[in-house]
Amino acid sequence: MTILVTGAAGFIGSHVAAALLDRGERVLGLDNLNDYYAVALKEARLARLLDRPGFRFLRADISDRATVEGLWPQFDDVTGVVHLAAQPGVRYSIENPYAYVDANVTGQVTLLEAARRMPNLRHFVYASTSSVYGANRKMPFSVEDRVDSPVSVYAATKKAAEMLAFTYSHLYRMPMTGLRFFTVYGPWSRPDMATWLFADAITAGKPIRVFNGGRMKRDFTYIDDIVAGVLAALDRPAPVDAETGAPHRLFNLGNNRCEELMRFIGVLELALGREAVKVMEPMQAGDVQETAADIELSRQVLGFEPKTPIEVGLPRFVEWYKTYHGIG
Ligand code: NAD
């Protein structure tokens, strides 16, 4: 019995893999270690997993159909899939659309094709994103809302991935759960995301770009809460969509507290012990004003309960950040 974790060298994937190993599962990690951001960081995350019994790693590109087909025989003992490999990032997607279609759409299909040939598969869990909700929608975002007006190429490809998963779930009766994550942060996070970018700038005394007067709101979610939600989704029995009868469900994993960016920066400044030099900039193309998760369904069905406010999570991130960079 093995859990396949794609994107295992990534931020969320490395935490999920570690948590699965902690509870005694065998984990097959898969990642192409691409250079969207520092490969050294991905290697460092991976090194912590490679040391552990029960972990095996495959370096492969999920957008390469022939490569993934070649791996099928290695998936015979896979009982669960946590599919997190993707090309993330909203702004980068405007300039690099093909990278998103390759990893998030073609990659989703190669994984689904592999999954339907896994003789022991019980559950396929995959990452989606709050970005699929788009702009100017009623708050908070609920999975019951129909979403079909993405603001970015990233969002469009993740929505496409959800639709492909839904289709495979009923065509092949494959139990599947899609999880829409809301702005995840914590130790070993991504250097292209706001928390890390702000920490770099504040530490170096350089200005930080604050978009839209810092009034943008995000449901910043701490990594441990996300991992708990992923494991809860993986463990539960086959889901059923009441409306369609398909064995597919979607859930929001958010913090249930929407924070103004300015307050988030304030807590980060406090944790770093330094004030930020702020440069105000207008709203960026592809960005949305507010993301807030309705997590009622996740509470009821998954028992999901986010436990970490930013006052607790940001100091943990800063402690890790200082150690990683050797800052005293
Ligand atoms: P990440 O970039 O740190 O991890 C993704 C990993 O996938 C990387 O290690 C990358 O090398 C790998 N990968 C990318 N393309 C690949 C390919 N073609 N073949 C094999 N491996 C490939 O990102 P993350 O923040 O850990 O995100 C994980 C998942 O969660 C993604 O699906 C992302 O869309 C979703 N998500 C993340 C956030 C967030 O705030 N971090 C929010 C919403 C959704």
Image (cartoon, rainbow, N blue to C red):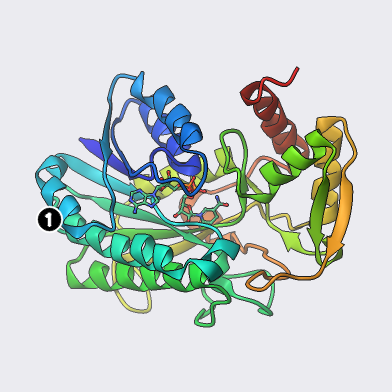
Quarter of image, res 48:
top left
- Residue 33's x, y, as percent? 38, 41
> Where is 137 relative to 221, above or below?
below
At 67% across and 29% down in the image, what residue appears? 321
Please name the residue that numbered disc 1 is placed on.
Answer: 117
Q: Is residue 199 left or right of residue 324?
A: right
Residue 167 vertical placement versus 298 (above, below): below
Residue 270 visible in the snapshot:
yes
In the rendering, at what x and y percent does residue 191 appear? 60, 43
Say which quarter of the image contains residue 200: top right
Query: From the viewer's perspective, is 72 left or right of 100?
Result: left
- Residue 315: image quadrant is top right
Question: Quarter of the image containing the C terminus?
Answer: top right
The amino acid marked with disc number 1 is Arg
- The residue lying at 12 percent from left, 49 percent from top is 70
The residue under the point 23% across, 36% down is 2
